[in-house]
C-alpha cells in the first residue's frame, strides 16, 4: 500500500514539473494561458453565472490540455526523426488539427457566453 501512495506522490511531482515546463518554455501554452487569464477576467467583469463558468473552465482546460498533448507529440516526432519526413509531417499536422478542434470548440463556447453580454 505504501508503494502505491509513494507512486501517486511521485506522479503528482512529475505532473507539476510538466505543468511548469509547459508554462515556462512553450510559446503556444504561454499564449493560450494569457488568453485564459483574459477570459477569466472577462468572466468576472461580466459576472457570468455558474454554468457559464463551468463551460468556460472546461473550454480553457480542453484547449490547454490538447495543446500540451500536441507539444508532446511534436517533441516525440522531432526526437525520433529530426529531419523532415512526410509521415512525421502528417502526424504533426493531425496533432495540430486536434488543437484546432479544441480551439474552435472553445471559441463557440466563448461566443455563446459573451455575445449576450455584449449585445444586451
Image: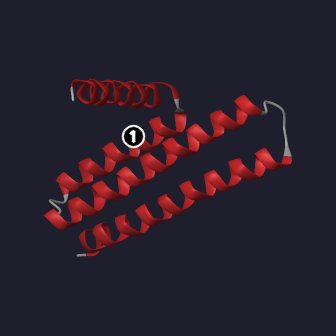
44 on left or right of 86? left
Please say if 63 is above or below 71: below
Percent position of residue 114, x then y: 30, 67
Percent position of residue 82, x then y: 78, 30
Residue at the spot x=28%, y=63% of the render?
55
Percent position of residue 79, x then y: 71, 29
Instruction: Determine if residue 99 is in view.
Output: yes
Percent position of residue 98, x then y: 57, 57
19 on left or right of 82? left
Q: In which image quadrant can residue 71 be found?
A: top right
75 and 119: which is toward the camera: 75
Numbered label tally: 1
Q: For the C terminus, give its image quadrant.
A: bottom left
47 and 4: which is toward the camera: 4
Residue at the spot x=65%, y=39% of the render?
74
Please say if 22 is above or below 87: above
In the picture of the structure, the residue carrying the numbered disc 1 is 34
Residue at the spot x=51%, y=25% of the render?
25
Q: In which image quadrant can residue 80 be found?
A: top right
Amino acid at each position: 500500500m505504501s508503494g502505491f501512495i509513494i507512486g501517486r506522490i511521485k506522479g503528482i511531482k512529475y505532473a507539476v514539473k510538466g505543468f511548469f515546463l509547459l508554462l515556462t518554455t512553450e510559446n503556444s501554452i504561454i499564449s493560450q494561458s494569457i488568453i485564459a487569464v483574459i477570459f477569466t477576467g472577462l468572466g468576472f467583469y461580466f459576472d457570468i453565472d455558474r454554468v457559464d463558468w463551468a463551460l468556460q473552465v472546461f473550454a480553457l482546460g480542453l484547449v490547454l490540455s490538447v495543446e500540451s498533448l500536441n507539444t508532446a507529440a511534436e517533441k516525440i516526432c522531432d526526437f525520433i526523426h529530426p529531419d523532415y519526413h512526410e509521415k512525421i509531417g502528417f502526424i504533426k499536422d493531425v496533432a495540430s488539427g486536434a488543437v484546432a478542434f479544441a480551439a474552435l470548440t472553445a471559441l463557440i463556447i466563448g461566443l455563446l457566453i459573451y455575445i449576450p453580454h455584449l449585445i444586451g
